[in-house]
């Protein structure tokens, strides 16, 4: 039943329980009641996609014990009213079916629409009702039953009918990366583009976007030979190099040997400590785009200063107008990208 209250804030501050004055993303706890405010939408959850940095942190903390990972995810959602990893500060996104639409919702959704939410789980009121009984804790994608609330300024997109739901969710989880990569590459004349974590989901899309946007050379950086083989088979990079992104000098040398330094460096890894290497691998007046939620932005800023590096650094915020359609277009039109995604699923 839709609430008769009319004082909803389109950014969702009316759902914040603590602390007072916070926005939903920074809040400690959210109100998860199912009754809607006039501009809200309730979605019946089908599947969560945990942010890669968040899932890695949980899996490493519990030494791969899936049951313990599942229990912690349930505890976080129960205590916070959202999936907001307190260590990484990240969450993920979800897919589901629209259950109810408030009369003042501006999102254009209808009851029965299958959608992917393109806003983070860190700000989405969420209730899990099945105890995640169908999830073994061994992957980022989490089958789930429950509900989530979207605000007036939330973003959601219809799931593509021509792709499996799991594939559509995986693509939309990282769709901001290729859209921003395209925009940055467009600002250079035939740049060299290096993507750190090039065999991952966001990395593969970013490489494809860079090539389509006119990069003269694309360099994919991966941590070991198994991922290098995957990336070579996909044909997304002109050069594939193996380097530890946490070793600044090794990364610098590897990118230079592959045709760098890079005019544009895109960081798509889910481990911390890659900021200095990305900066060193980038040419003067170049751009570093950080898409990883494992990034320390203070380390990036102070590291660039300490290295006297004249580079522009951008935070990939996950939203660029048209980002979902563009990412899906890349997957549909590039067999290498789609193959990498399907192998990871």
Image: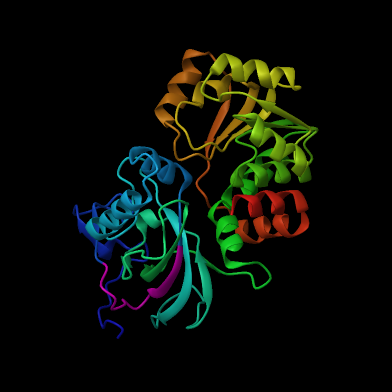
Q: Hey, which residue is sitting farthest bottom in the picture?
A: 1
Can you give x and y, in whole percent of width and height, for residue 309 in the image?
56, 17
Measured along the vertical axis of the image, is residue 211 above or below residue 176? above
> What are the residue bounds of the magenta stretch?
32-47
Q: Nearer the viewer, residue 192 or 220?
A: 220
Q: Left or right: 30 with respect to 249?
A: left
Examine the structure image and report whether residue 38 is included in the region drawn in magenta: yes
Q: Quadrant of residue 328?
A: bottom right
Examine the rendering and report whether any part of residue 262 can be seen. yes
Can you give x and y, in whole percent of width and height, for residue 319 in the image?
53, 53
Examine the rendering and report whether any part of residue 187 can be seen. no
State the residue at coordinates (47%, 33%).
271
Q: Left or right: 165 with respect to 234?
A: left
Measured along the vertical axis of the image, is residue 251 above or below residue 83? above
Q: Quadrant of residue 39?
A: bottom left
Image quarter where the N terminus lies is bottom left
Name the colouring of the figure.
Answer: rainbow
Q: Nearer the viewer, residue 311 or 62?
A: 62
Can you give x and y, in whole percent of width and height, for residue 280 in the image?
59, 18
Count of all numbered marks drawn on residues in the image: 0
State the residue at coordinates (50%, 46%).
317
Q: Quadrant of residue 299?
A: top left
Examine the structure image and report whether residue 191 is included in the region drawn in magenta: no
Image quarter where the C terminus lies is bottom right
Q: Left or right: 16 with respect to 334?
A: left
Measured along the vertical axis of the image, is residue 192 above or below residue 176? above
Can you give x and y, in whole percent of width and height, for residue 139 in the image?
47, 52
Q: Nearer the viewer, residue 146 or 135?
A: 135
């Amino acid at each position: 039943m839709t609430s008769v209250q009319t004082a909803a804030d389109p950014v969702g501050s009316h759902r914040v329980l603590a602390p007072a004055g916070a926005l939903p993303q920074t809040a400690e706890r959210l109100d998860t009641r199912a009754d809607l405010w006039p501009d809200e939408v309730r979605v019946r959850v089908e599947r969560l996609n945990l942010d890669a940095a968040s899932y890695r942190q949980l899996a490493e903390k519990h030494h791969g014990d899936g049951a313990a990972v599942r229990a912690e995810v349930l505890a976080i959602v129960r205590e916070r009213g959202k999936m907001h990893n307190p260590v990484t500060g990240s969450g993920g996104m979800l897919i589901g079916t629209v259950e109810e639409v408030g009369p003042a919702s501006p999102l254009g959704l209808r009851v029965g629409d299958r959608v992917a939410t393109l806003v983070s789980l860190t700000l989405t009121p969420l209730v899990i009702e099945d105890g995640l009984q169908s999830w073994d804790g061994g992957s980022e994608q989490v089958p789930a039953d429950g509900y989530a609330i979207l605000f007036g300024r939330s973003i959601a997109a219809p799931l593509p009918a021509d792709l499996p739901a799991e594939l559509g969710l995986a693509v939309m989880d990282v769709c901001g990366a290729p859209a921003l990569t395209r925009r940055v590459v467009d600002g250079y004349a035939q740049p060299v583009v290096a993507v750190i974590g090039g065999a991952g989901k966001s990395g593969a899309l970013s490489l494809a976007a860079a090539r389509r946007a006119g990069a003269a050379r694309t360099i994919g950086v991966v941590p070991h030979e198994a991922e290098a083989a995957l990336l070579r088979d996909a044909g997304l990079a002109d050069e594939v190099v193996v380097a530890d992104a946490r070793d600044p000098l090794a990364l610098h040398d590897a990118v230079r040997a592959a045709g760098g330094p890079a005019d544009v460096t895109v960081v798509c890894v889910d481990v911390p400590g890659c900021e200095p290497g990305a900066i060193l691998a980038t040419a003067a007046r170049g751009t570093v785009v950080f898409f990883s939620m494992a990034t320390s932005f203070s380390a990036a800023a102070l590291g660039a200063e300490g290295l006297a590096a004249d580079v522009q650094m951008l935070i990939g915020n996950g939203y660029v107008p048209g980002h979902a359609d563009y990412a899906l277009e890349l997957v549909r039109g590039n067999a290498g990208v789609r193959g990498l995604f399907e192998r990871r699923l």
